[in-house]
Amino acid sequence: MGARLSVLAAVSLAIVGSGEAFLQSPLMKATQMRRLSQQTTASRRATPALRMALSMPTMAPLPSIEGLLPDCPVTKWSTDIDIAAEQAKYQTEGISESLMTITATAEDNAKGLDFFIENKERIMQHMTQNGAVVFKNFDMSKDPEGFRRVWETLEFAPCLDPIHSSGLRSFLSAKDGVYEEVNKKSLAKHYIGLHNESTFKKTATYGAFVCFSPATVSGGEFFIADGAKIFRDLKQEVLEDLYGRGVRISVSNLDLGFLGALGPMKDNAKKFVEGLVATAVAPKFDMDLDMIYGADGNPDRLQAIEHKQSPINRHPVSGKPVWFCNVHNHARYLRDRRPCSVPEVGMTDVYYGNLGKLPSDTLDHINDVSNKHIQNLAMEPGDVLLIDNYRMLHGRQTFEGDRLHAVSWFRKGDEEVNIVAKPNPLNSLMNLMIK
């Protein structure tokens, strides 16, 4: 039984993919929360008394929403797209600036949550039409509860992360629906490329990212890019090729060459592991995964690969086409050419729909166009970035020192609500084993 659980834990670690969801130990999280509390207290003490009295009135604690968040909504696919015609339309009509920056004045902070009430219509209109809003220099959002007050005031409807059901997404503050971002020192030197927070089956509609503490030494900038602009600027022939053939994303590598020691029993052992992963682990991730040996040429490597999907999609509200593919982050060819501290078990890759290899010149072109549209955001404590997750892709630079950023995910608000049960004991056991 113990050996079987060890295999399950190892495989679960693999399916998480890039390792960006690895949980922190409770001790490390407690240390971070104490540091955050100390920073918030120090920041508020440094605020002029009059402004503090006006901007930070005494508020009753918010009720906990732990265990009450609905599941992440299903991905809305609409992929009947005339690429040439839509690219031409973008070229003719243009694409407005996606990011709006709102920097708080003393008067804005003095209004507290009333500022967000007064500006809600403007904020949400920009989000709908353009895709991203960043709030800077606000006092309210310097701790998880204050951050939650901001997005609740804007009437965002919180939901779980797309792979929350795996038990491998870590809350920084479960009572406030706030997940921890990728702050682990073991992944500090890992560059996280552009991606939407989505799987083939589930996609968060919006996201709100908050900085509680930037990297204490250097780096760690959060960045975004507009999927509409990437769609517009990719070569038509590249888009046509990927759109016509589809893509499949591998989210793990499980190398089983050691089974060769079993001699004639090797093939049966490989089938056993494949079945174990498919029946006992993969369903927990709710990702429509196929377990496939040898897709990358290594016959003893078992990969968990998502179903065929389109790299482009129509925005569910505007109907306009966007680049909706995580290849910039997941392609092994690109990861091998960047800072990457993810172990082999967590390496990802992207294939054609028939599991054929994507050409290097295609990946280089996608990388160049994506990089051209990256906007780096140096966030300070309390800064909040709102994004439309169908339109805007996001990522993170490498960093040195300690860093504490967090995120909450949202649905549109009119979907059927499905409350997800807490992770089962097997999930919890895996979490303890994965440090």
Image: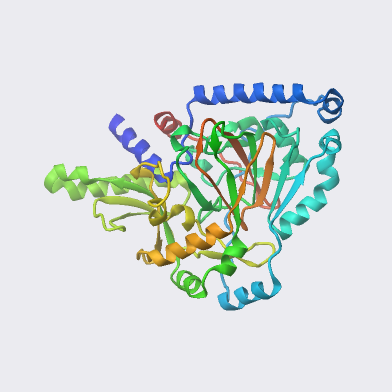
Task: From the top left corner, tell me how far across and down residue 243 is, in percent.
Answer: 49, 70
Q: Residue 245: which quarter of the image?
A: bottom left
Give the mark count: 0
Task: From the top left corner, tell me how far across and down residue 138 is, in percent.
Answer: 75, 36
The residue at the point 34 percent across, 44 percent down is: 344
Q: Is residue 25 left or right of residue 160?
A: left
Residue furthest front as drawn:
218
Q: Is residue 33 above or below residue 390?
A: above
Residue 308 visible, this orientation: no
The residue closer to the viewer here, 378 or 321, is: 378
Q: Is residue 252 left or right of residue 30?
A: left
Q: Is residue 195 left or right of residue 127?
A: left
Task: From the top left corner, tell me how far across and down residue 106 is, in percent.
Answer: 84, 35
Q: Identify the coloring.
A: rainbow
Q: Residue 222: which quarter of the image?
A: top right
The residue closer to the viewer here, 353 or 65, is: 353
Task: From the top left corner, tell me how far across and down residue 334 is, in percent.
Answer: 42, 55
Q: Residue 213: which quarter of the image?
A: top right
If the image is split into quadrants, where does the N terminus sit? top left
The residue closer to the viewer here, 95 or 349, is: 95
If the image is split into quadrants, where does the C terminus sit? top left
The residue at the point 57 percent across, 68 percent down is: 233
The residue at the point 65 percent across, 72 percent down is: 90
Residue 417 visible, this orientation: yes
